[in-house]
Image (tube, grey):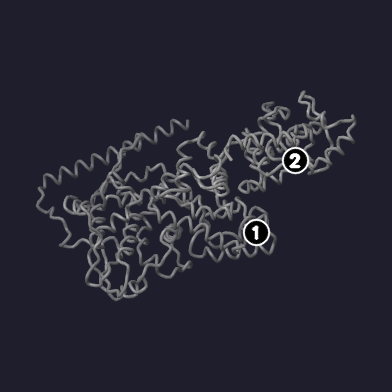
Amino acid sequence: MDSRTRRDRLSKEKQQYFLGIASIRFGALDFNWCRQRNPLSGSPDQKNVASLETMFRRGCDWSPEQVSHQIPALIDPALLEDSLQRAEKSLSLEDLKKEDGVFAELDLADGKVICLKGEHRVLASDATVVNRKKRWIVRLYSTDLSEDARNDLADERASERQMTDAEYFYNITLFWLKNGDPDQGPRPNPWFAQLMRHSEGKAKDLKRLWSGPSSQGDLLRRFHEIPALFWGISLGNVGKTIAMPRQQTRNQIKRVFDFWDYICCHDVSMKLRLDMNTIKVVSGRASGAYAGLNLANSGEILRNFDTTERAAILSRLELATTDRVVPTLVILFRNTLYLQSVIDCLRHLVPRHRQARDLWDDLNNGFEERGDGRCLLQVSDTRFKLVHVSEIDQFEIARRQLWLFALREFPSLPRDVTSKRAEPKSCVDEAKLFELAVLAHRLGCRSDQIDHIRTNTCWRPSPIQSVYKQDSNIDSKPYKHGKPHPEDLKRYKSSLFLSNLHKPFDPENLESSFFFIQRSLYFDIYPDKPQGIDELLHRAAEVGECELIDDEYRPRIQGASEQLICQEDQLRASISELQERYDQLLSQESQCQKN
């Protein structure tokens, strides 16, 4: 059926089952249908209700008789007939259909009128208007109205509030699930069309994430089993997420669903009853963070479950978070810029024109396994071990160690791009760049870029301080996601080596939340145990250490003249002074804006 035929059919059906317009008291209005239709909302948006209250108190926008504000609702025709007969003045259905601006006041029992939308306006009005005015103008339709027609009435352009990213994603993808994937369905997706009008870029990115070469739709469709998990989706970051290595994103998405599927005991009913506020409150928490808050007993979380179910869920939460934090989509999307910086650090090793999503394929194409049966294990910034292992995936071990190097050093190795913002240019620490190239080469990676860095990069440690401290993407508050605080990274980055991450985890000896959060991120991205890792770590204890940069790899800079070295130091000092001055001016400007 084409869209025009469908519109004609719906128009005729709504006209056929239209019963009239009446003034209905608030108590008779029931909004359970709205809540069941949109499980993401769970409960009314109190911020929106408060905003409407403020407007109504100022005398703005309180107009229940206005056509665009009238609430479409369903009622049993027999019940309506009975109410008309009991009215003070004898009324008929024809009287209700007269759109003359005069609305009959009907007295119906509580909860007898099934509203299709409008809850926020009614709640705001209930808190602001006097008792005699606690009525709303309702367009009444028969309960015989089809589900398609009900949805069409509910989807009419609403002025109550802007839809959230989660609601857009849920409704758009639910439509595709029911009516066929994009470009295949029998009729256009109204939610997608609305998002296209709001932001064409976000709409196109969402479509790419759901279907196509870079899609994750096969995983995300399962989230409709647990609708509350859509909380935290950021459509503005979808494009950046697609640009990341595909398997990295797949593993993170799968982790979110599998975790909550387990928490809900794989029970269909429990998964549907999980609410968004529960996801929001426990996101990023670890074991021991639930009991003391008394959240379940207060009804702040798990409000749709009985006492036995709450106990089972809380027990599983405790068990599942002894060594990792609670995963959610908000953590995935808010880590996007962080992980982009980590991947960009490693893109120094491949051609500049190559995409981030192709990084590991590019490095794997030129990978050479060691022929002596030994595998390299980095144990510190400057030391490594060569360990005999019978069977091991050398590239997988190399990939993870390079990724951990970038996790430790990404502030020193930003990608060389032109920024549109007025800020100091990020400086690449050549010493760290050289160490990255040497590590990659020792691990078996080969590329022209690696050879170029080894040949042309200075290895003398650079005194330049990273501009990471001024990064606007860093939140100064305690964090559960995103780029770590510079002080934490500097203090604890020495814990981010493969042997520390894969050894048995002991929460009693946990030195910092930094390690716990980064460890969780590592296993979200690399959930599988690589072949031979246990043997590698066991045998490494019996092997001596080697220098990462020995005579074979050390660049020959000793012949450089003292004058050039002196000039270089002077230039670096000047850059540092300019950086300091810039920071002072930035701080002064910030203070002026606050004042």
Q: Quadrant of the N terminus?
A: top right
- Residue lying at 33% horizontally and 37% vertically, measured from the top left: 419
Of residues 254 and 313, which is closer to you in this image? 254
Between disc 2 and disc 1, the foreground one is 2
User: Disc 2 and disc 1: Cα gap in Å?
Assistant: 27 Å
Count of marks placed on residues = 2
Quarter of image, res 518? bottom left
Q: Residue at x 35, y 38 (%)?
A: 583
Horizontal side of residue 350 vs 492, given as left or right: left
Q: Position of residue 381 (x, y in %)?
A: 28, 60
Q: Which of 36 and 575 lies nearest the eye of the viewer?
A: 36
Residue 23: x and y, percent? 79, 32
Q: Secondary structure at mark 2?
A: strand
Task: Kindly identify the amino acid type of the residue bearing the numbered disc 2.
Answer: Leu
Q: In the image, residue 153 lies at what x, y percent?
A: 67, 37
The residue pinned by badge 1 equals: 269
Q: Disc 2 designates what residue?
A: 74
In the rendered image, the residue lying farthest to the top is 100
Residue neighbourhood size for the residue with mark 1, other residues' Cα within 10 Å, grouped as few (<14), some (14–19), many (≥20): few
